[in-house]
Image (cartoon, rainbow, N blue to C red):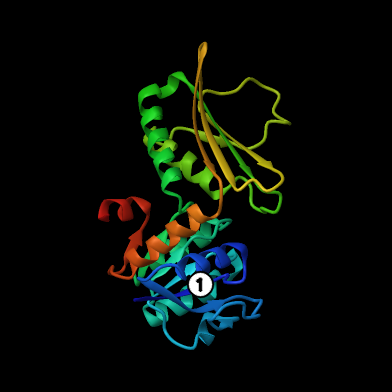
Amino acid sequence: MVKIAITGANGKMGRVISGLIAQRDDCEVIAGIDINTVQIGSFPIVKSPFELPEKPDVIIDFSHPSALDDLLSYCTMNGVPVVVATTGYTDDQVTRIKNAGEQIPVFFTFNMSLGINLLVELGKRAANVLGGQFDIEIVEKHHNLKKDAPSGTALMIAEAINNELGNKLHYVYDRHSVRKPRESTEIGLHSIRGGTIVGEHDIIFAGHDEVITLSHSAASKEVFANGSINAAIFLSKKDKGLYDMSDLLADA
């Protein structure tokens, strides 16, 4: 039985994760970490990982970038694997997450959905085939409470495609003040916020007289929650290192 602690336990994703874990027999939640310490389940909730009543086998983080320092400090000091599923990190924070993989097992991805990761692979394949003949635009849609834009997933898609094309492209986030034709070396990223949209991502390849669109739509937060739980089980058996969804899929 894998013992899991959840950072952001009282948030929407934290509650979904704990609810799904309660239905499994291979893991259990032993504690939560949240600035809101109201206990809503059978496990205690503390404000800091350093207040955890016992050492977990792995921590799932669906909280806020501001919690990163304490989280990484606790995990590296105590040798606890961590699944980092929060978005909105700065470049410096991403570097710190990756560096932590030199000391402990770290699972880091901008999206825990299997479908999204397949979308990324299809996007890379399409970019490789279409080369510089098609303009590439990425459109992401999320609920009206999401704070970061573009989404971490949109950036993950753009990075993957750019790497596939030799990092020759640059990103354009807003065209309202751009008074010139589109450059062929651009990847456009566009954000839409509204209602209760869980998450939608489109990769548009626009060529001469034809358009190819690759799309993924999440109907509920469970697709991300299940991915993070599977990542936690996977990570609990690993040595130090930086892991992502491709490693989990290869291990299946």
Q: Nearer the viewer, residue 22 or 154?
A: 22
The residue sitting at 41% across, 29% down in the picture is 127
> Residue at 66% across / 80% down in the picture?
38
Q: Quadrant of residue 45?
A: bottom right
The answer to which of 163 and 121 lies nearer the viewer is: 121
Residue at 56% across / 46% down in the picture? 219
- At which x and y percent is residue 97? 45, 64
Q: Which residue is mark 1?
A: 6
The kind of residue tagged 1 is Ile
**Relative depth, front residue between 174 and 29:** 29
Residue 143's place in the image compared with 190, above or below, is below
Crowd around label 1: few <14 · some 14–19 · many ≥20 (10 Å): many
**In which quadrant will I find the C terminus?**
bottom left
Q: Residue furthest top?
A: 209
Q: Secondary structure at mark 1?
A: strand
Answer left or right for 42 relative to 236: right
Residue 156 in picture, x, y percent from top left: 48, 45
**Residue 222 at x, y percent in the picture:** 51, 55
Q: Residue at x 39, y 32 (%)?
A: 165
Q: Position of residue 1 (x, y in %)?
A: 34, 76
- Compared across the picture, whether 180 is left or right of 28 comes to right
Compared to residue 25, the image places residue 12 above or below, namely above
Question: Is 114 placed above or below 69 here?
Answer: above
211 versus 78 height, above or below: above
Q: How many marks?
A: 1
